[in-house]
Image (cartoon, helix red, strand yellow):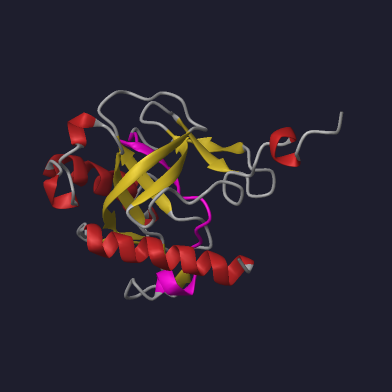
Amino acid sequence: MGFPSPFYRWRPHPWHGLEIGPQPPSIVHAYIELTPFDRIKYELDKQTGYLRVDRPNRTSSFCPTLYGFVPRTYCGNRVKALLPGATKGDGDPLDICVISERPIQNSEIILKARVVGVLPMLDNDEADHKIVAVLENDNMWHEVQDVADLPKVLVDRLRHYFSTYKMLTPEDSKVDIAAALGREEAEKVVQAAIADYADHFGE
Protein backbone atom coordinates (compact mmCIF):
# COMPACT_ATOMS: atom_id res chain seq x y z
CA MET A 1 0.00 0.00 0.00
CA GLY A 2 1.38 3.41 -0.98
CA PHE A 3 1.58 6.48 1.15
CA PRO A 4 -1.50 8.72 1.26
CA SER A 5 -1.57 11.88 -0.79
CA PRO A 6 0.27 14.82 0.86
CA PHE A 7 -3.07 16.67 0.84
CA TYR A 8 -4.38 14.18 3.40
CA ARG A 9 -1.17 13.85 5.41
CA TRP A 10 -0.64 17.55 6.10
CA ARG A 11 -2.94 20.33 7.06
CA PRO A 12 -3.18 22.94 4.27
CA HIS A 13 -1.96 26.43 5.10
CA PRO A 14 -5.07 28.56 5.81
CA TRP A 15 -3.82 31.45 3.69
CA HIS A 16 -2.35 29.58 0.74
CA GLY A 17 -3.86 26.10 0.85
CA LEU A 18 -7.59 26.82 1.09
CA GLU A 19 -9.88 27.81 -1.77
CA ILE A 20 -11.02 31.43 -2.09
CA GLY A 21 -14.66 30.33 -2.07
CA PRO A 22 -17.44 28.90 -4.20
CA GLN A 23 -18.44 32.14 -6.00
CA PRO A 24 -15.89 34.90 -5.52
CA PRO A 25 -16.18 37.83 -5.19
CA SER A 26 -19.79 37.33 -3.98
CA ILE A 27 -19.47 34.22 -1.81
CA VAL A 28 -16.06 33.54 -0.31
CA HIS A 29 -14.48 31.37 2.32
CA ALA A 30 -13.52 32.99 5.60
CA TYR A 31 -10.91 31.55 7.93
CA ILE A 32 -11.87 32.73 11.42
CA GLU A 33 -9.16 34.01 13.76
CA LEU A 34 -11.32 35.76 16.38
CA THR A 35 -14.80 35.35 17.81
CA PRO A 36 -16.84 37.94 19.74
CA PHE A 37 -15.90 36.06 22.93
CA ASP A 38 -12.11 36.38 22.65
CA ARG A 39 -10.26 38.55 25.15
CA ILE A 40 -6.99 37.72 23.38
CA LYS A 41 -5.99 39.02 19.94
CA TYR A 42 -4.98 36.02 17.83
CA GLU A 43 -3.30 36.36 14.46
CA LEU A 44 -2.24 33.92 11.77
CA ASP A 45 1.41 32.96 11.92
CA LYS A 46 2.28 33.38 8.25
CA GLN A 47 5.07 30.81 8.28
CA THR A 48 3.33 27.89 10.00
CA GLY A 49 -0.35 28.61 9.32
CA TYR A 50 -1.27 28.24 12.99
CA LEU A 51 -2.81 30.93 15.16
CA ARG A 52 -0.35 32.85 17.30
CA VAL A 53 -1.18 34.89 20.40
CA ASP A 54 -0.62 38.50 19.40
CA ARG A 55 -1.64 40.29 22.60
CA PRO A 56 -4.39 40.56 25.19
CA ASN A 57 -7.07 43.05 24.18
CA ARG A 58 -5.74 46.50 24.95
CA THR A 59 -9.21 47.91 25.60
CA SER A 60 -12.54 46.63 26.89
CA SER A 61 -13.90 46.39 23.32
CA PHE A 62 -14.83 43.07 21.76
CA CYS A 63 -15.12 42.52 18.04
CA PRO A 64 -18.89 42.34 17.50
CA THR A 65 -18.67 39.67 14.78
CA LEU A 66 -16.56 36.74 13.69
CA TYR A 67 -13.30 38.04 12.25
CA GLY A 68 -10.74 36.51 9.95
CA PHE A 69 -9.49 36.63 6.38
CA VAL A 70 -10.23 35.43 2.86
CA PRO A 71 -7.74 32.77 1.70
CA ARG A 72 -5.54 33.47 -1.33
CA THR A 73 -5.98 37.22 -1.12
CA TYR A 74 -3.35 39.89 -0.55
CA CYS A 75 -3.60 43.62 0.08
CA GLY A 76 -1.12 45.12 -2.33
CA ASN A 77 -1.10 47.82 -4.99
CA ARG A 78 -4.51 47.08 -6.49
CA VAL A 79 -6.16 47.25 -3.07
CA LYS A 80 -4.19 50.40 -2.24
CA ALA A 81 -5.51 52.07 -5.39
CA LEU A 82 -9.08 51.70 -4.10
CA LEU A 83 -8.42 53.77 -0.96
CA PRO A 84 -7.50 57.45 -1.42
CA GLY A 85 -4.64 58.47 0.85
CA ALA A 86 -3.16 54.98 1.21
CA THR A 87 0.58 54.71 0.57
CA LYS A 88 0.42 50.91 0.21
CA GLY A 89 -1.62 47.84 1.05
CA ASP A 90 -0.97 46.34 4.46
CA GLY A 91 0.65 43.19 3.01
CA ASP A 92 -1.79 40.82 4.71
CA PRO A 93 -4.68 38.71 3.45
CA LEU A 94 -7.98 40.58 3.10
CA ASP A 95 -9.81 40.90 6.42
CA ILE A 96 -13.46 39.89 6.73
CA CYS A 97 -16.12 40.34 9.42
CA VAL A 98 -18.88 37.71 9.30
CA ILE A 99 -22.27 38.18 10.93
CA SER A 100 -24.05 35.12 12.29
CA GLU A 101 -27.34 34.82 14.16
CA ARG A 102 -26.18 31.99 16.43
CA PRO A 103 -23.09 32.39 18.63
CA ILE A 104 -20.02 30.68 17.19
CA GLN A 105 -17.36 30.35 19.86
CA ASN A 106 -14.71 28.38 17.97
CA SER A 107 -11.97 30.02 15.98
CA GLU A 108 -9.78 28.24 13.39
CA ILE A 109 -12.86 27.31 11.40
CA ILE A 110 -13.76 27.82 7.74
CA LEU A 111 -17.15 29.12 6.68
CA LYS A 112 -18.90 30.44 3.59
CA ALA A 113 -19.59 34.16 3.74
CA ARG A 114 -21.73 36.35 1.48
CA VAL A 115 -20.13 39.74 0.88
CA VAL A 116 -22.45 42.71 1.55
CA GLY A 117 -20.17 45.69 2.16
CA VAL A 118 -16.79 47.04 3.19
CA LEU A 119 -15.32 49.40 5.77
CA PRO A 120 -12.57 51.41 4.04
CA MET A 121 -9.90 51.54 6.74
CA LEU A 122 -6.64 53.46 6.64
CA ASP A 123 -4.24 52.20 9.34
CA ASN A 124 -0.91 54.03 9.58
CA ASP A 125 -1.44 55.13 5.96
CA GLU A 126 -1.90 51.52 4.80
CA ALA A 127 -5.03 50.19 3.10
CA ASP A 128 -6.61 47.75 5.55
CA HIS A 129 -10.16 47.23 4.28
CA LYS A 130 -12.61 45.22 6.39
CA ILE A 131 -15.07 43.24 4.28
CA VAL A 132 -18.50 42.94 5.89
CA ALA A 133 -20.34 39.68 5.19
CA VAL A 134 -23.12 37.47 6.48
CA LEU A 135 -22.93 33.75 7.06
CA GLU A 136 -24.20 32.03 3.94
CA ASN A 137 -27.35 29.95 4.57
CA ASP A 138 -28.09 31.84 7.78
CA ASN A 139 -31.85 32.33 7.54
CA MET A 140 -31.86 35.31 9.89
CA TRP A 141 -29.72 37.31 7.43
CA HIS A 142 -30.95 35.66 4.24
CA GLU A 143 -32.54 38.80 2.83
CA VAL A 144 -29.53 41.03 3.46
CA GLN A 145 -27.95 41.82 0.11
CA ASP A 146 -26.11 45.03 0.97
CA VAL A 147 -24.61 46.66 4.04
CA ALA A 148 -27.48 49.18 3.90
CA ASP A 149 -29.83 46.29 4.79
CA LEU A 150 -28.03 45.69 8.09
CA PRO A 151 -29.05 47.38 11.36
CA LYS A 152 -27.15 50.67 11.52
CA VAL A 153 -26.12 50.04 15.11
CA LEU A 154 -24.29 46.85 14.08
CA VAL A 155 -22.28 48.66 11.40
CA ASP A 156 -21.58 51.48 13.89
CA ARG A 157 -20.25 48.92 16.39
CA LEU A 158 -17.87 47.52 13.78
CA ARG A 159 -16.60 51.00 12.90
CA HIS A 160 -16.17 51.86 16.58
CA TYR A 161 -14.29 48.63 17.32
CA PHE A 162 -11.77 49.07 14.53
CA SER A 163 -11.38 52.76 15.35
CA THR A 164 -10.45 52.05 18.96
CA TYR A 165 -9.22 48.48 19.41
CA LYS A 166 -5.54 49.51 19.42
CA MET A 167 -6.09 52.75 21.31
CA LEU A 168 -5.50 53.43 24.99
CA THR A 169 -5.18 57.21 24.63
CA PRO A 170 -6.33 59.61 21.88
CA GLU A 171 -2.69 59.93 20.81
CA ASP A 172 -2.62 56.22 19.91
CA SER A 173 -5.22 56.57 17.18
CA LYS A 174 -3.76 56.42 13.67
CA VAL A 175 -6.81 54.80 12.13
CA ASP A 176 -9.30 56.42 9.78
CA ILE A 177 -12.46 54.56 8.77
CA ALA A 178 -14.81 56.11 6.25
CA ALA A 179 -18.52 55.29 6.03
CA ALA A 180 -19.32 51.74 5.01
CA LEU A 181 -19.60 51.10 1.28
CA GLY A 182 -22.02 48.70 -0.36
CA ARG A 183 -21.73 45.27 -1.96
CA GLU A 184 -20.51 46.42 -5.37
CA GLU A 185 -17.59 48.35 -3.89
CA ALA A 186 -16.82 45.46 -1.54
CA GLU A 187 -16.66 43.01 -4.42
CA LYS A 188 -14.20 45.32 -6.20
CA VAL A 189 -11.95 45.12 -3.13
CA VAL A 190 -12.20 41.30 -3.10
CA GLN A 191 -11.33 41.14 -6.80
CA ALA A 192 -8.38 43.49 -6.28
CA ALA A 193 -7.09 41.38 -3.38
CA ILE A 194 -7.35 38.20 -5.47
CA ALA A 195 -5.38 39.89 -8.27
CA ASP A 196 -2.82 41.24 -5.79
CA TYR A 197 -2.31 37.69 -4.47
CA ALA A 198 -1.67 36.42 -8.00
CA ASP A 199 0.78 39.27 -8.63
CA HIS A 200 2.61 38.79 -5.34
CA PHE A 201 2.79 35.01 -5.16
CA GLY A 202 2.82 34.26 -8.87
CA GLU A 203 -0.41 32.29 -9.11
Q: Position of residue 176 (x, y in %)?
A: 30, 61
Q: Position of residue 145 (x, y in %)?
A: 18, 49
Q: Is residue 200 left or right of residue 172?
A: right
Is residue 167 among what the camera can see? Answer: no
Q: Position of residue 49 (x, y in %)?
A: 64, 43
The relative height of residue 200 versus residue 159 in the rendered view (above or below) is below
| Residue 143: quadrant of the picture | top left
Q: Which residues are magenta?
A: 61-80
- In this view of the protein, can residue 98 be seen by the observer? yes
Q: Residue at x 40, y 65 (%)?
A: 191
Does 78 sit left or right of 18 as displayed?
Answer: left
The image quadrant where one finds the N terminus is top right
Q: Which residue is rendered at x = 70% and y = 34% of the image?
A: 8
Question: Quadrant location of the C terminus?
Answer: bottom right
User: Hey, which residue is sitting farthest right in the picture?
Assistant: 1
Who's the residue at 72% across and 36% down the image? Answer: 10
Taking depth in this image into account, of 51 and 21 the one nearest to the observer is 21
Residue 167, percent from left and from top = 37, 47
Q: Please identify the quarter of the rendering in which residue 180 is found.
A: bottom left
Above or below 113: residue 91: below
Question: Can you say whether 11 is above or below 83 in the image?
Answer: above
Q: Is residue 93 above or below residue 13?
A: below
